[in-house]
Amino acid sequence: MVVDPQAPELVDSDFVAMMRASHLCVLIHDAATKNILWANPAACALLEWSVSELRPLKANHMSSSAQQYDRVIGRAWLQDAVERGMSRIEWHYRSRTGRVIPTDAVAVRVELAQGPAVMVQFRDVEREQRVEAELRQTTSYVDALARHTSTVAFMLDSAGAIRFATDTALTHLGLSGDTEPPVGRLLTSYARLRRDGAEIGWAEAAAAADPAAPVRLEIPGAEPVTLEGGLERLRDVDAFLMILHDVSTRIRGEERRELELRHENHLARYNAMGDMAMAIAHELGQPLAAAANFVAGVRAHAQALESVGRVPPGTTEQLEYGLDSADRQIDRVSAIVGALRSFVGHLEHVEQVVDLNAIVDECLYFVRLRASAAGVEVGVRLSEQPLPVRCERVLTGQVVLNLCFNAIDEMAGTDRADRRIELITELRDEDGAVVVADRGCGVRADPFAESFTSKEHGSGIGLALSYRIINRQHGSIWCEPRDGGGSLFAFTLPLA
């Protein structure tokens, strides 16, 4: 060590002055007897004793009464310093007023003029221990928040990347405890942000958080999860806190209630249609009868004119064809009206047994007529074996027509080369089935679960009535996408 020759040399009194000025507490013990020889002012102030009062005190007078601070242990600690040169311990002193003071104490052997001694330097660590305990408690709170709460919480940076997530949040994202935490990955890579029913980006969500804003998080999957809560911009920190709760059950309940309301509305429409059908069926009886009489009159008049030679040859045959076609249409309308009155009125159990092949065959004339006008080819594949089902013949045929007409209308907007529908009957387990397949644009939702049609023009009554007719006859009706594009509309009825 280089000593400045100009620097003044320190004397013993200088070291004593420095020791007295130190804020570190110092006690000097005799190496042999462990009696207190001296204490600096900081030690006297902390222990609330003067030097003269400290000298006769023993360890039990100025230490905690707890067993680990017994006098024997204190003497052993001081003796360890005598033998080894230094020894450290956490020691609890007791002040004159009884206050227990935890300290970090270091005992060091020093050689004095009168012989060896032990200098104990110690400081009050009560505040440090309190801070440490608070930190441990805070850590436990954070750990509890991260691992033992149902609350979903994310800490996000300004770019929307995840910096912290609770275990519940990770579980909702589909990340198990063994998965590497998604720190640094964008939250929007796992879920969609929504507000007021519309999807938004992170920049829009962050801009709205001034300082807080409501937000919804939708996590896709087999069973989508909906989380709802708030996004808060943290003050003085370039970060955001997102606190969410799982509201999937509530959202699904709202969707169910909405569906129930639609079904109730649908049922009201059914009831209204029933009343309307009864009224129409009642009012159509006379016009239909009159139309049939007019057709019969025209036919008789034409035959009378032909008999007296006033009609050119072959004209009667043409009139007969047109009148026969009109008769068939009137008969069919009359049958539909009669069946509808019976169905809407008191139809609970259908006793009529009909072959589904025969019903489809009866409908083909009208299906091909509609398809020809739209340039749609009709393919037919009937079951080789009879499919006897218990149903109302005319109304079941009307369901076949509704499904075929819808398919033809759907095909009218496609490429002419692809305009083809297929009408199929087949046996499915213990049911007879009718399938109408098209190559249209397909369906985006189950039309039988909606209250109204998705077609640009129409009220949806055709499918609604079809659904009710088939269900009242203990069958089932559905729609599904067709492999390769298009849709399959089908219904089944129990075999008789």
Image (spheres, rainbow, N blue to C red):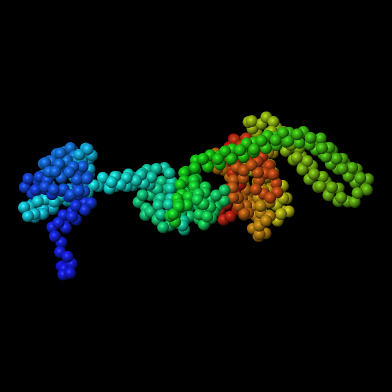
Residue 270 in the image: above or below residue 381: above
Q: Position of residue 57 (x, y in %)?
A: 13, 41
- Relative placement, left or right, of 81 versus 406 is left
Choose top left, top right, bottom left or bottom right for residue 145.
Answer: top left
Residue 188 in the image: above or below residue 278: below
Task: Give whichever of 129, 376 is nearer the camera.
Answer: 129
Q: Position of residue 441 (x, y in %)?
A: 62, 54
- Relative placement, left or right, of 40 versus 212 is left
* Residue at the image position 77 percent from the left and 33 percent from the top: 282
Q: Position of residue 357 (x, y in %)?
A: 64, 43
Task: Give whichever of 151, 441 is nearer the camera.
Answer: 151
Q: Position of residue 480 (x, y in %)?
A: 57, 48
Question: Can the viewer see residue 358 in this picture?
Answer: no
- Relative placement, left or right, of 258 versus 90 is right
Quadrant location of the N terminus in the rendered image: bottom left
* Residue at the image position 20 percent from the left and 40 percent from the top: 95
Residue 3 in the image: above or below residue 65: below
Quadrant location of the C terminus in the rendered image: top right
Choose top left, top right, bottom left or bottom right for residue 473.
Answer: top right
Task: Give whichever of 411, 9 is nearer the camera.
Answer: 9
Task: Give whichever of 201, 422 is nearer the camera.
Answer: 201
* Residue at the image position 40 percent from the left and 52 percent from the top: 164
- Total number of numbered discs in the rendering: 0
- Relative placement, left or right, of 178 versus 417 is left
* Residue at the image position 10 percent from the left and 45 percent from the top: 35
Question: Can the viewer see residue 265 in this picture?
Answer: yes
